[in-house]
Amino acid sequence: MVDLNAIITLIGTRLAIVGNEFVFYGPAAECEGCKLKNTCNNLKVGNKYRIVDVKNEQMHKCVLHDIGVYAVEVVPGQTVALVDSKKAFNGSKIIYEPPDCKEFDCAEYKRCHPVGLNAGDKYTIVELLKEERPQCPMEYPLKAVVLR
């Protein structure tokens, strides 16, 4: 089945494995003069992606990856996050806004502010997790969900 959210990009051959997930942090300075930079850097900075297909027919040379890069097909990755329980409905589309919280040592802080999600971006709730309501020191009503 063709995934309409799929994007073709380039990734190091050692990393080009179906199922691998990564967060795109943007282009490196060394990419500036490369003729393939637009294909390598066509993802949204800060977003999480999962490799669904590797096109290893041709390897391309790369100054960052010692062996080179392959074309891969990626889709948005899934991330577990805590969201406002009033917005937590399976299949709903939300604009992600992490809780306004400075409790950095909270056990749930990483799930409230997960790597790979950008505040203000749209995501789909693909699963409601069946777990007890997280204990929030700020008393926010939170629900654990899987976002894509």
Image: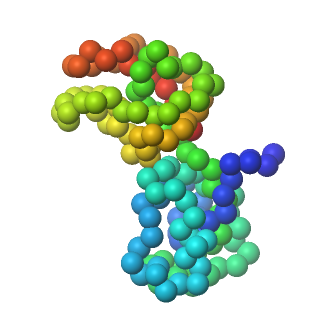
Image x and y of residue 9, in percent: 62, 65
Query: Is residue 126 positioned above or below 75 on the image?
Result: above
What residue sits 42% from the left and 25% below the top?
Answer: 83
Q: Looking at the image, which is closer to me, 47 or 146?
A: 47
Q: Looking at the image, which is closer to me, 18 or 31?
A: 31
17 on left or right of 101: right
Quadrant in which the C terminus appears: top right
Query: Is residue 143 positioned above or below 4 on the image?
Result: above
Image x and y of residue 15, in percent: 53, 64
Q: Which colour scheme is used?
A: rainbow
What residue sits 46% from the left and 34% below the top?
Answer: 96
What residue sits 68% from the left and 48% below the top?
Answer: 5
Image x and y of residue 145, in percent: 49, 26
Image x and y of residue 28, in percent: 41, 73
Q: Can residue 66 be seen in this view?
A: no
How many numbered discs? 0
What residue sits 24% from the left and 30% below the top?
Answer: 101
42 on left or right of 133: right
Query: Is residue 38 positioned above or below 90 on the image?
Result: below
Q: Can residue 114 be seen in this view?
A: yes
User: Residue at the right extreme?
Assistant: 1
